[in-house]
């Protein structure tokens, strides 16, 4: 059994070895890489990514990243391809075959069939002298010096390099397409990530009601309103124009200073520079403002008029935080 120091050292060495492999990829960003980017940008079909073993798993991740950043892609398992899945490939598709050695039996069987389709074949390969590399139209070189595995056998550095090259390709394509956060949101409507990209302040504040008092409201009126809406704050309004905000913290501080409450009004207590956010802003922006100002709620406006309150608990419930 390894001691704590040895365990940490082994882990650090593995990370450093993989980091070294990824850093070395910079030297392989060549004219073939640029041409592949250009071919994909002008592609009328899809990108078909194939591989076997660990490379197949990397292929699936690359496909997921390409799809989510605006490049239509499909995964085709190399072993299944010769048993019917070659039908996935259409006339205008581009094929990326992933392999460390480029010489596995499955790849050697598959490549001639891929060539028969007359589609562009890109080898994302760790051996530029391999069968796959020599039969490809373009090469994305992912050669690594050694695996992070102590026996230099288990795919570790090599699969990390494949993944990084796929990410580099996806990022370049994303930049070339001017793929924005709004485009990204279209492909990520579910989960916390999707909500950060499309959920608006008004989607949440409209569910809360609109707690408000007039400037002349008494302390009793203010407390009743804050308690009724349970948002920890109330807006002070002149018609629909926001004059200020009173939080439950403001009430507590006022009670510490005053014993005679009969003459105190909302205008005496309110904060006169409340943080306000438009209802059409992203809910994620509301979170940023709350964190930046160490507050738990914001007043919401709609075309300059009071539209309600958004509370940090609203964001928690939606998984924005």
Image (cartoon, rainbow, N blue to C red):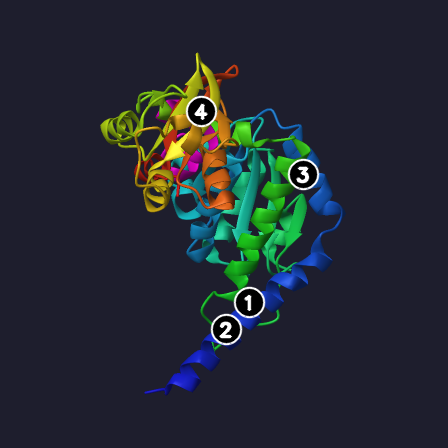
Q: Nearer the viewer, residue 14 or 107?
A: 14
Q: Residue at x 66, y 59 (%)?
A: 25
The answer to whether residue 147 is visible is no
> Gap in Å between the C-alphas at discs 3 and 4?
44 Å
Q: Secondary structure at mark 2?
A: helix
Which one is in front in this view, the residue at disc 1 or the one at disc 4? 4
Choose between 166 and 152: the one closer to the eye.
Answer: 166
Lower position in the chain sequence, tag 3 or tag 4? 3
In the rendered structure, does residue 143 fall within the stretch colored magenta?
no
Q: Earlier in the sequence, mark 3 or mark 2?
A: 2
What residue span does the magenta drawing correspond to?
187-204
Specify the quadrant of the image occupied by residue 70: top right
Mark nearer the N terminus (3 vs 1):
1
User: Disc 2 marks which residue?
Assistant: 14
Q: CA distance from mark 1 to mark 2?
A: 6 Å
Q: Is residue 23 above or below residue 231?
A: below
Horizontal and vertical percent position of residue 152: 50, 75
**N-terminal-most mark, 4 or 2:** 2
Q: Quadrant of residue 182?
A: top right
Question: Which mark is drawn over residue 238?
Answer: none
Image point (57%, 48%), residue name: 166
Mark 3 lies on residue? 37
The residue identified by callout 1 is: 18
Q: CA distance from mark 1 to mark 4?
A: 48 Å
Q: Position of residue 250 (x, y in %)?
A: 38, 39
Name the quadrant of the C terminus.
top left
Seen in the picture, residue 180 relative to 207 is either above or below; the reply is: below
Main SS of the magenta part reads helix
Q: Answer few, some or many: residues within 10 Å of disc 3's Cα (few below 14, many 20 plus, some between 14 and 19).
A: some
Mark drawn on residue 300: 4
Whether the residues at callouts 1 and 2 have beta carbons within 8 Å, the answer is yes
């Amino acid at each position: 059994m390894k001691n704590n120091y040895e365990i940490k050292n082994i882990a650090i060495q593995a990370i450093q070895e993989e980091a070294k492999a990824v850093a070395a990829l910079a030297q392989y960003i060549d004219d073939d890489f640029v041409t592949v980017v250009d071919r994909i940008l002008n592609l009328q079909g899809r990108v078909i990514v194939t591989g076997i073993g660990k490379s197949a798993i990397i292929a699936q991740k690359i496909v997921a990243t390409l799809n989510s950043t605006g490049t239509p892609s499909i995964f085709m398992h190399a072993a299944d391809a010769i048993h019917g899945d070659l039908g996935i490939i259409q006339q205008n598709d581009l094929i990326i075959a992933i392999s460390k050695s480029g010489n596995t039996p499955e790849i050697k069987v598959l490549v001639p069939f891929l060539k028969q389709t007359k589609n562009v074949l890109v080898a994302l390969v760790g051996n530029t002298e391999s069968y796959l590399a020599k039969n490809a139209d373009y090469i994305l070189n992912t050669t690594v010096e050694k695996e992070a595995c102590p026996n230099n056998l288990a795919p570790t550095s090599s699969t990390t390099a494949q993944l990084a090259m796929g990410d580099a390709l996806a990022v370049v394509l994303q930049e070339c397409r001017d793929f924005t956060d709004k485009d990204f949101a279209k492909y990520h409507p579910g989960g916390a990530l999707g909500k950060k990209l499309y959920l608006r302040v008004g989607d949440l504040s409209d569910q809360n009601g609109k707690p408000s008092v007039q400037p002349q409201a008494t302390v009793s009126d203010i407390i009743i309103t804050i308690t009724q809406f349970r948002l920890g704050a109330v807006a002070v309004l002149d018609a629909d124009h926001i004059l200020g905000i009173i939080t439950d913290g403001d009430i507590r501080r006022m009670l510490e200073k005053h014993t005679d409450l009969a003459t105190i009004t909302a205008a005496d207590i309110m904060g006169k520079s409340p943080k306000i956010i438009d209802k059409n802003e992203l809910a994620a922006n509301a979170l940023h403002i709350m964190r930046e100002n160490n507050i738990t709620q914001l007043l919401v406006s709609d075309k300059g008029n009071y539209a309600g309150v958004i509370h940090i608990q609203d964001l928690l419930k939606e998984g924005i935080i």
